[in-house]
Each structure stands twice: as C-alpha cells, then as structure tokens.
Amino acid sequence: MINIGIIGAGRIGKVHAESVTRFVKGATVKAIADPFMNEATEAWAKEMGIPCVYKDYHKILEDKEIEIVLICSSTDTHSSISLEAIAAGKHIFCEKPIDHDVNKIKEVMDALKNSKVKYQVGFNRRYDHNFRAAREAVKAGKIGDMNVLKITSRDPGAPPVSYIKVSGGIFLDMTIHDFDMVRYMSGAEVTEVYAAGAVLVDPEIGKAGDIDTAVITMKLSDGSIAVIDNCRRASYGYDQRVEAFGSLGQVAIGNDSDSTAVISDANGVTAEKPKYFFLERYMAAYTAEVDSFIQAVINDTPTEVDVNDGLQPVLIGLAAKRSVAENRPVTIKEIAEEYGL
Amino acid sequence: MINIGIIGAGRIGKVHAESVTRFVKGATVKAIADPFMNEATEAWAKEMGIPCVYKDYHKILEDKEIEIVLICSSTDTHSSISLEAIAAGKHIFCEKPIDHDVNKIKEVMDALKNSKVKYQVGFNRRYDHNFRAAREAVKAGKIGDMNVLKITSRDPGAPPVSYIKVSGGIFLDMTIHDFDMVRYMSGAEVTEVYAAGAVLVDPEIGKAGDIDTAVITMKLSDGSIAVIDNCRRASYGYDQRVEAFGSLGQVAIGNDSDSTAVISDANGVTAEKPKYFFLERYMAAYTAEVDSFIQAVINDTPTEVDVNDGLQPVLIGLAAKRSVAENRPVTIKEIAEEYGL
Amino acid sequence: MINIGIIGAGRIGKVHAESVTRFVKGATVKAIADPFMNEATEAWAKEMGIPCVYKDYHKILEDKEIEIVLICSSTDTHSSISLEAIAAGKHIFCEKPIDHDVNKIKEVMDALKNSKVKYQVGFNRRYDHNFRAAREAVKAGKIGDMNVLKITSRDPGAPPVSYIKVSGGIFLDMTIHDFDMVRYMSGAEVTEVYAAGAVLVDPEIGKAGDIDTAVITMKLSDGSIAVIDNCRRASYGYDQRVEAFGSLGQVAIGNDSDSTAVISDANGVTAEKPKYFFLERYMAAYTAEVDSFIQAVINDTPTEVDVNDGLQPVLIGLAAKRSVAENRPVTIKEIAEEYGL
Amino acid sequence: MINIGIIGAGRIGKVHAESVTRFVKGATVKAIADPFMNEATEAWAKEMGIPCVYKDYHKILEDKEIEIVLICSSTDTHSSISLEAIAAGKHIFCEKPIDHDVNKIKEVMDALKNSKVKYQVGFNRRYDHNFRAAREAVKAGKIGDMNVLKITSRDPGAPPVSYIKVSGGIFLDMTIHDFDMVRYMSGAEVTEVYAAGAVLVDPEIGKAGDIDTAVITMKLSDGSIAVIDNCRRASYGYDQRVEAFGSLGQVAIGNDSDSTAVISDANGVTAEKPKYFFLERYMAAYTAEVDSFIQAVINDTPTEVDVNDGLQPVLIGLAAKRSVAENRPVTIKEIAEEYGL
C-alpha cells in the first residue's frame, strides 16, 4: 500500500483525496496539509479516513512513509513545492500550471533531470472519456492524416475580476487546457500562433488588461492547422468540444449532459443543456488521471503527462498573449529562445 | 407524350397536376374534372397549362387521347369511377382507399382481371425518402431477419368531428397508411391484429363512435411482430417514424423538419419541430408516386402498389375495428372469409 | 453510523457493498454472508474493509448491531429470508423479484403489516438518471396528460437456456423491470394486458417453454395505453428507451454510450453503440437506490419502492404469460382475485 | 408575364431555367444563349418550352420584350456582359463573382449608379433553408450579441488542377461564399483578416500556387470575431455548417442528408452522410434566389443581394490571399484603398 500526501485542501485537493480513497487500488491518503486547515476540513478528513492533518506541508515532505505528493496548493507555490518535493525524493502529481514563469518551470525540469522522481501535470482532460475517444480515433488512423483541428472551449461564466487579475490572463488560465488538447489530439507540436482577442463579456475584464473572447489559430509541426475558440461565458453551460478533421474523415466530440431526455412540444425538440460545472463534467477524469499517475509510480512506467507537457502550453500561451498585443503571428521558437530553450 | 386526365380538383388533385406538369417526363395533363369546378380552379388550370376543364368526369373517360386517369375524387366514388375507367380502358392511379367496403374493392379486382389496365393505389409514403431508405436497408439485409417493427403515426390535430363521422373510423382513415407501411417495410402479410383504443383527444370523437388514440399489435406471416401507435393529435407536429428491429440490428427513421438549426441557450438545446402538415412532409413523395405510375404505363412494367396492396390494409383495418369492439385478437383470415376471399 | 449486513456475495451483493463503502454517508457494511463464500471474496471483503464474513446469513440476522440487510441471494430465497429478517426486526432492501409466487409475496406483505420494518425492492431503473429525468418531466406536467407510453427493452444477448428454464419466463425475469417502469412513468396502475410473443432469437428458448421476443400492450387505470417491446438480443447493445406521449408533447429518453464521439467518413456518420452491459448502464442507479433506502431508514421516511411495487409487476407478468398462452387480453383483476387480492 | 433571357446554358443556367419554368410566378424564360449551343441543349430548351435559343447573347440584350437577364456565363465575362446589359436597361441577376478584378466590379458599380437597373449577385446560400434559419435566429436576437461566428466549409473533392489554375485561388473561388456568409450571418463588415493556409490534399494544388486547406480569422465591425475553416476534400461529403455564438446562446446548423435513417448494429449507430453534391444541397436555394430577384423586379423593391454584396467578399478574399503570402493580418481598408474605394 503506497502512502500519499496531499498538499492543499481546497476543492481540487479534496477531489483527489476522495478519488484515491474510493477508487485507486494500492494507494491510501496518509496526510493532507493546508495553511488554512480548519475544523470543517479536519472533520471531512476524518470521515475520509485520512490519519494525518497538517497546516505545514513540510511535515508531509519529511514523512518517510509517504512516497507520493499531490500538489494542489495555489498556483504561485507549484514550482517551489515541486522543487522541495523533488529534493525530498517524492513522486509528484502537480496541478496545472507548473508556473506562469517559464524560468521556474525550467528549474523544475532541471531538478527532475538529476532525480528518479516521477512527475505528472494535472491536465485532466486527457483522461476525459470524450476527449480520449477522439484521441483514440485519431491514433487508430480513423481520420487519416490530420488536416484541421478545431477546439471549442467556453466557460459557463467569467470568474471574478479579482481572480482574472492574478490569473495570468485567459491564455495561461483557460486556454492552457485547450493548448494541451491541441498537442494531445494531434500528437504534434505547435510552431506558430495567431490570436484574435476581444472583450465582449465584461468591460471590467478589459480594464484588468485581459480579454474574454478569443480565436487562436496555430500552425502545427505536422503541417496541419489548429484553431481554438474561447469565451468566458456560455449561457447554456460548459461547452467543450473537438472536431478533428483529416484525409479520411472527421471525429467530433460533444458535451455531456445530465440525461438523454428530449422533450418535443409546441416550443420545439429540446434536449438538456451541457453539464454546467467543470467538476461535474470531468469528475471521472480527475479520478482517472490520479489513478494513472499512481499506477505509473507503482509499476515504474513513464507518466502520461510529463513536465514538458506542462511547459509547452505555457510557451504557446505566451505566444498567444504576444500575438494579441502585437497583432502578428508569433512562433513558439521566438518565445522559447528568450528562455534559452 | 402521354395524356393524363385528373378526376377531382381538390387539394390532392391539384398536387398531382402540378407534379406532372413540373416534373414528370413524357406526360402532360390534358384535362381535369370536378363537379364543383369554379373560377379559381379554372384560373389555376390555365396557369398550369391544362387545356380542358370539366364538371363531368365522363368527358375525360370519353376522351380517346387520354390514356391515364388519376382518381382524386371523394372516397365514396373511388370504386365506381375505377370500374368506369377500367371499362374505358384507362390506366388508373386511384387515391387510397379504393373503398371502405371490401365487396366494392373485389368488384374492382375482378374487373381488372379481365383487362390490361394498370392500377396503382395512392400509398404515397412508400415513396417518401425516409420510409424508402428504411425499406432499402431492410431489403438489403442490414438488420437481418425482422423481429419487431414499430411505427409511430400521429397527426398534428384531429379533423372536424363531421369528417370523423364519415371517415370510416381511425383505422380505415388514418392507420390504413400505417398498415400499408407494415406490409411495405416487412415484405410480409399481417395475419392477426389486436388493437387497444382510447378516446383521449376529444370526447366528441368518442360520441361519434370512433377512437382517437390506439396501439395496434400485429402478428406477421414471417413470425415477427409489428406494433403501431396512433394519435389524432401531437402538439409538436406531424410525427411519422419507423423502427425496424432484427437479428443484426435496427434501422430507424425520424421526421423531417424545416431546418437543421439547433439553438443552445438557457432553456436547453432546441431543434426544430417536425414539419406540421402532411403535404409539406410528403410533397416529394406525391411527385414520386405519380411519376412511378406513369413510367410503369410508359414502360409497360407492373405498378409498385397494386390493387391487392389497396385491399389488404382495408382487411387489416376491419380486423382492428372488430378487435377494439370485441376486445380480442382478430385474424385477417376471419375477415377475409366473410368476403369470400 | 448504521451497520449493514449483505446476504449474498454474488455480483449484485458486491456492487451494493462497494456503493455503501464508497458513497453512502452514515452507513457501513459490517458483514457479508454467502453459502459459497471463498477466498477471493474474503480477500475482496478485506480490501473493502468489511469486518465480518460468513457462510451462514443467520449470523447477520442475529447480530444486534446490524439494522439493515440487503438481500442479494438467489431469487428463490428472497421471500423466506425476507420473512426471517422481518422477524429479526431488520430493515430490508430486497433484490427483485420478491418471489415468482404471489402467495409468497403475500406472506411478506402480511409480515410487514405487523412490523415497523422498512422494505424496499430493487427496481434500480427508477434511480437511473435518464428514466428519472423522463419521470420528472411527466410529473412536472410537461407532456400534459399521458396518452401513450412506449418502452423498448432489449438485452444485448440471451442468457443460457439453463438460466431461462428457472427464470420464471421472460415476463417475470426481464419484462418485470419494464412493468415497473410503466407504473413508475405513468403513476397509474395496469388494468389489462395483451401480449404477443415469438421465438426469434433461439429455438432452444422455445423448446424450454419460453419466448424471446414480445410486444405487450397494457391498458392503464388513467385511460392511457402502454406498450413494451422486448427482445433477448440486440446486436448493438443494451437498448433501454422510453417515450411518454401526452396531450402537450412527448418526452423520450435514449441510451447512454461510452462517449459522444461521432465519426464522419465514407461509411456514414457513426456514433457509439449503447453501453453493452447492464451494470455499466445502471451503476450509478445501483448506488442511488441503496443510498435512497438507507436514508429512508436513517430519516424514518417511507421507502421509494415498497412491497406493493414488488407485487404489482409480478401480477402483470403473470397476466402477460397467460395472455400469450391463451391469446387473449387478461385483466390484472383476474390474476389478483385468484390470489385473494 | 415578365420575359427572361438566360446568358449561358451550362449547369447553372439550366438550373435557373428550370426553376423559373417550374416555380416562379409571373415570369417565363423567353430565350437562352450560349456560344457552345448544341443539339442536346436545344432539345432540352424545347422540352422546357423556351422559345428562343441563340449562340449570341446580344440577341437577348436586343430583345425589347426581355426585361431580365440571368448572367450564367463563364466568370471572366460576368462584368463585361453586366455592363452591356446595364446599357441595354435589363435587370440583372449575375452569378458570383462579378469579377476577380476589383476595378471591373467598380465599373459595374459605377454603371449601376446612373441606371434604374436592379442587380443581384448569385450568393445562393443566403436562400438555403438552414443558413436562413440561422440568420433569422440571429436577427430575432435569440443569441443576443454575436461574439464568435464559426463557418465550416468543405468540398467533397478538389476540382481538377486545370480549374484551380484559373479559379482565382481558393479564397476567390471557394471561400468567397463563406465570406458572404460571414457578412450575411453577422450583419457586420469584415475589417481585418488573418489566414493560415496549407497544401494537404494534393501537392499539385500547391505547385499551381494555391492552397487546399485554410483557417481564416476575421475581425468584424461589431467587435466580434469570425473564423472559417476550409478544405477542398471531405471524405464524407459536402460539409457546410455554421455556429453563431453570442451573449445569450448559440445557433448551429448542420448538413442535409438524403434521409433520417439511422442504422444501429455491431458497427455503431450510423446516420447518413451529408449530401455529396452542392446542387443537391442547394437546389431549393437556387430556386428561391431567382424567385426573390424576379419578385424584386416585379414589385420594384431592392434586391436582397446587391452589387456591394458582390464586391465585399472579393476584397476579403484578396486580403486573405495577401495574409497567407505575407503571413500577417491584413485590413480590408488596405485592400480597398489600393482600388480607391
């Protein structure tokens, strides 16, 4: 039985704790730490059967019985805790993004090079049943060579402007998942980005220096073209779709909804809206990604989403940001070279 | 150029005239007759380029240049005009039903035996693109052996009770099309019928001695089972669907609508309603059935829907009627033998 | 923390144990008993944290700390164990059917009358997200008054003929769920049944005295008509659908599949098949039904599926069986009176 | 009865002739001219009841009884024949594009300014039932303010490279319809274009200096963003879809297919492919556009698609071409100013 420590007891930390406890064979959550640990969380931990509850995550890093840590703390701590955990020899599952600062990601990459630590980044959509079915179809050659990859990604509503201000901007906060999906779906690398952005949802987002609506075109290393359209608000729920079009055909995935019920009446033929909340849509994916990581540790196999998979979407996001600012296509090479990559 | 005379200038007579004029190669409408011929219809005929307009249909039967008649008069005249037209040697396309009285259908059958006249009954749904696609799939073996055939057939709204009273009842007026579809889809004969009926739309229909809602189960000569559900009112439009289920799979057809537009908003994901009016749904089928008949005449091939195809659904309808009245399954043999068939 | 004992450690017993352990708040599985208890099951129980493992279920009934039993043993023991458990004062969740013999169900009903024991029958489909969405739409008046209720229920493949022989026949084994769905969807009682049956899947099933394909028409107490079509084999998977049609419209539910992926290529536009296995389709429903029962015990509220809900589908099934045997509609009253109900 | 002359008896000229003859009230085709007039076409014209058949279209322009001309000749003659027809005082329906050369379009615009001639450009998709339903939903405010407009437009197969060479390139030949759709759907003007192009279908297209796959992002005058994805080959047929996404929701339109038949079997749940051929998909739209134009002449109302609607997509197409060549966003203003617009 492998022991797990969870750093950060916010929403996603709890989700991972419950996944491990309920569904993951061969692993148990031994400890959870959060600087804001409170009675409610302690009660929840007790109910989940988690023996150790800390305010200071260093107690997890110091615990010799704990082999794996899940880093679910605030984004600005991901890279520094990663470095400490690598030093402590813990295998690491780190929520996305590793950091908004490429240099800090590089530090983590360097530290990993000299260690036997396994590292996985929390790009949960790779474990979603729909995205995975699309990827499997592509990999199986069902669409032939990819020509055009289209991703629609719309949140049900914008986060508070206070969050927007520290989010790193739409491309590093929201589109980063879609950039990962471009790489996952295509199996290719993004080489160049052109992004058109607009403030159409909330002028306050514009005042905060961000955009809320975007269309991002990418040239890929295999010669194909990808395009993402984003919006911070979709009246009908969380809208996450992909169309991968190739020489032999197309695979498309749609949204999940609460039921297959369709009502036909004087107003039309009406199906249910997509699930509204990302945790509803991706709950099974969160379980699957953590399970996949733990099995990789147990079986000593490579993790499915490694540190480079954490780096690339940040580079693409920075290219997209510059593309909007300067209204020109920006290569990934241009960004990477600035960081000596 | 083959000359056609149309007997009856009501809605369906005009539909056929326009089909022939616009789309049917090798044929032209020479005359149209209607006892209630009026100025508006004469103006319409002129615009359509129909040279002869009569009150008395005998003028059509007497016209040696006319080879084909389309009988689109009121139902109670179908069999007698058929007999006259057979005597006059005209090829006949007769709207359904030939008659509600089996004896009168038998007279037409007998007259046809001693003639070279081609005869087709107006079961237009056999020419609908959806029903035909389902039938082609069945015929091509795509579902294997038929096990269960399900037909949903609902009108958008009930006709006036005055019409209901002379309609012959729901089974001869409305379900007759569905009985024909059972035979068309399966390629088998109905051997036994059990019908459950109810008055759920309008109590006046019940007072008139009819029902407005029914579920009819049929045993077929190939061992499979068919079931039809009918209702005189569907709030969302004209609902005409088929599911044919067999040893290898199922083919299902749905309704046509005005467009593929789907609106996603706070109310759900809403597609258009089915087309409301049978003429909208089946317009192309009306053209195709008349064209098919005329080509059968021109090429001297058998008609696709013959006089026996006109008889069988009437026998099934009578069995269904008796089944409701006596609350028992009724064989087609029982009905047929009463008419010496 | 309420203690639960599970009688029967077969597939469904294990499903319930896992549901309680993972998802049900306020309850824990203390014991599981099975006459065929073996090492594998004991190891599984240990992993699930179930402290007591027995061959003899009486040890569960004798355990004063256990308040709830889940009866998951073979069908022929459901009623006798129910009686023992009632005598022991345990609240009971019993897998369907209580018994194929109405007299034995009556004994259970009688015993319950003089006790405070809560009793729920395992009609899991009532807890399925799709069926529930349809029921909620009906209850909310979205289709107005029910006119026609249609249920399609097809298994992916027939069970072994050895099972068929002891199954009680298709109506008590398979359709019983659909009869329950008729009552659940409509909120009305079945008053009369006409069933047409056929042997189209496997002649051995016919030799065993059963049928494998059926269409069952039911008249309901609210004047509406219901129809079920069953088949023991659907090449494309487990097919469980409902259409409830009423004065204001229709609600229809379809199947769940593994993903929303749709592939468009030279062969057509192809979506995934329905989930193949009932445990896949209904896993969440199994959890929800057990949770609902346990919460009813904890909160001392009525169970959602009571002993009468266990009785009625058996009566309907017996009526259907007689209907096929005698080829006539059979009333539920006729069956009920034979049992003094 | 208004007399019509058709200049060009190729595929589209014949389509228009048949539309007018069959469906347009108040108009008749008096003459058709084609330099390659042959016996087959003459026979067809006779069957259609077209009295005059010419090689030289000037005979149509000289015919005082002809009030309307439909210009269906080769693209390179559209503008010069337009000028002659304006001089002759004929109302003009001109197939798209007016010309690939903006200066020639300007000449037509100038000539129209000093005349009472009505002019319509053949952007048939505006009359398609699906596109129109989407536009009506947008106009009715059902999606609120437009945020992102997405158009997918894929041909079933690439035309011969010999055609590609004289086609003006993908943007003026194929995307021009989609540029028109951007303007039609949004009711706004395109202000800036960025296009990414690739040669993925056929290297010969690349050698001919063209591309076969493209993603084109446009900024619109209302602040929203539009994106088109094009490909010259879709294995599954002619793929023409729109998604218009706004503050209140989304309207999406899909393709038409030959039937609603869906086959469920061991391979999946398979619907029909989109219609393969643009004439099949848009036949009713061709009739509607010609009818709309003729009614505008009869009722002296503005045409629905005017000469500016013919100009703008050419400007957008030229901007897209330059965008690919120079890999930068290009404003419409930049192009327009070069032509003194």
Image (cartoon, coloured by chain):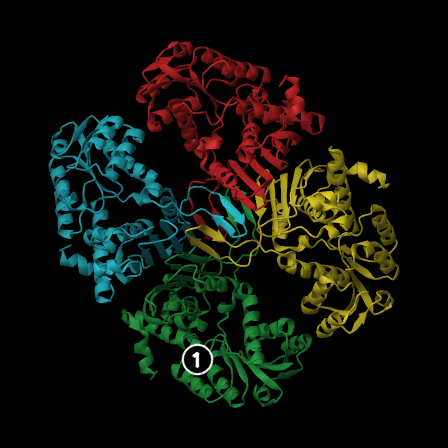
Chain colours: A green, B red, C yellow, D cyan
Name the quadrant of the N terminus of chain B. Answer: top left
Given residues D248 and C267, the one toward you in this image is C267
Label tally: 1
Horizontal side of D86 relative to B276 (left or right) equals: left
Q: Residue at x 62, y 42 (%)?
A: C150
Residue B74 percent coordinates (x, y): 49, 18
Residue A281 percent coordinates (x, y): 53, 63
Q: Residue at x 32, y 56 (%)?
A: D231
Chain ID of residue with mark 1: A
User: Which residue was labeled with disc 1?
Assistant: A99
Inspect this view and state whether residue B74 appears: yes
Given residues A86 and B25, the one toward you in this image is B25
Residue D220 percent coordinates (x, y): 29, 57
Regarding mark 1 in the picture, which secondary structure is present there?
loop
Q: Residue at x 78, y 47 (%)?
A: C311
Given residues A137 and D81, the one toward you in this image is A137
Choose top left, top right, bottom left or bottom right for residue D113: top left
Horizontal side of C336 relative to B327 (left or right) equals: right
Inspect this view and state whether residue B76 appears: no
Name the quadrant of the C terminus of chain B. Answer: top right
Residue C296, placed above or below residue A326: above
Residue type pointed to by label 1? Asp
